[in-house]
Image: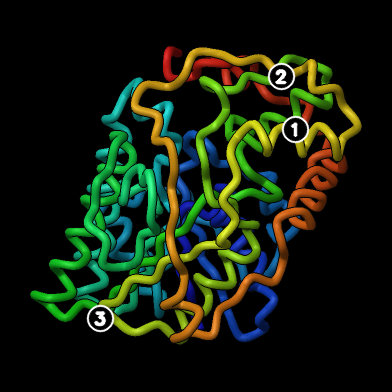
Amino acid sequence: MRLLVTGGLGFIGSNFILRMLEHEDIEITNVDAELFGSDQRNLSQIKHSNRYNYVKGNISNKKFMEEQISKCDAVVNFAAESHVDRSINDANPFLVSNIRGAFTILDIITKQKKRMIQISTDEVFGSLNQGTADEKTKFNPSSPYAATKAAAELLINSYSVTFDSDVIITRCTNNFGPRQFAEKLIPKTIILANNNSKIPIYGEGKNIRDWIYVDNHCDAVEKSLFKGKSGESYNISAKNEINNITIVKKILKMMDKSEELIEFVEDRPGHDFRYSMTSKKISEELDWKIDIDFDKGLEKTIQWYLDNPEIMNNVSQTILDSTPWKN
């Protein structure tokens, strides 16, 4: 199978590529624009593999993507501007990548009759004070980032209905694990704690997310690619709702660091309080389940960063800033 992965130099995309190359009958082309969050070091271990090909390019470039998609059997679209804080500061790059880019792929795979897996997010459902979102829950995005991901989903659904495009949408909760970009909560906490620096916590730290180890997410995407039903969407959740302050304290305990490093800072504008999804559908229909629990995943994540000091020690202060939406 020839697989085109977009955004494969990023966090989840790189982990997915490494996982898929364990299958000896799969060849992968990785298209990445090398924008914010991309890192060549994420895939340095496979750069000489004869089953891996890297091509720098932008998914919104129609002519470029027509050529790349013509050489593959299916597309998994991880490419996206994904950091909520930055969408508050400037939403335009999110519109270009998350809507225009996704549409470019969608239109091409429809004409070339290929399969597309669109990687979306639980944030399309917005903040839930109670209850849990399933695949039929109405969208209620709160941030520019979430709105662009919801817009892409609507376009994809419209093509499924109108043109019978072979498309599947997966929505996942908060990922963590090796290779995550440093401005996200868990890697930022690990890096700052390792340096005995203050760790910023938005507001009171009570915002709740459902945390999933990245390998579990990649497993779900793989099952959706090979076993998923065209036109369907699948929610991916670990049923592991934890607030931010608890996460940070757990990391500090695992790293034998003092909670005095915690510093409460100004809360982010429009900060959703709680996300929650059920993954009952993908569990029942595609036989997906969690293999790595939260604590084990967190231990593996901390160890990965400690084992990669060249990444830990080369993060700009701007990325570690306590209020990045103001930069």
Q: Please provide percent x and percent y for residue 270.
A: 34, 27
- Residue pictured at 48% horizontal, 65% vertical: 236
Mark 2: which secondary structure? strand
Q: CA distance from mark 1 to mark 2?
A: 8 Å
Q: How many marks?
A: 3
Q: CA distance from mark 3 to mark 2?
A: 52 Å
Disc 3 to disc 2: CB gap under 8 Å: no
Q: Within 10 angstroms of label 3, few (less than 14), some, or many (20 or more) residues? A: some
- In the rendered image, the residue lying farthest to the front is 130
Q: Looking at the image, tell me whether mark 3 or mark 2 is earlier in sequence order.
A: 3
- In the rendered image, the residue lying farthest to the left is 162
Label at residue 249: 1
The amino acid on which the numbered mark 1 sits, given as a three-letter code, is Lys
Residue 134 falls left or right of residue 303: left
Q: Quadrant of residue 167?
A: bottom left
Mark 1: which secondary structure? helix
Residue 148 falls left or right of residue 173: left
Q: CA distance from mark 1 to mark 3?
A: 49 Å
Mark 3: which secondary structure? loop
The amino acid on which the numbered mark 3 sits, given as a three-letter code, is Lys
Which marked residue is nearer to the observer: mark 3 or mark 2?
2
Label at residue 262: 2
Q: Is residue 9 visible?
A: no
**Residue topped by disc 3:** 113
Disc 1 to disc 2: CB gap under 8 Å: yes
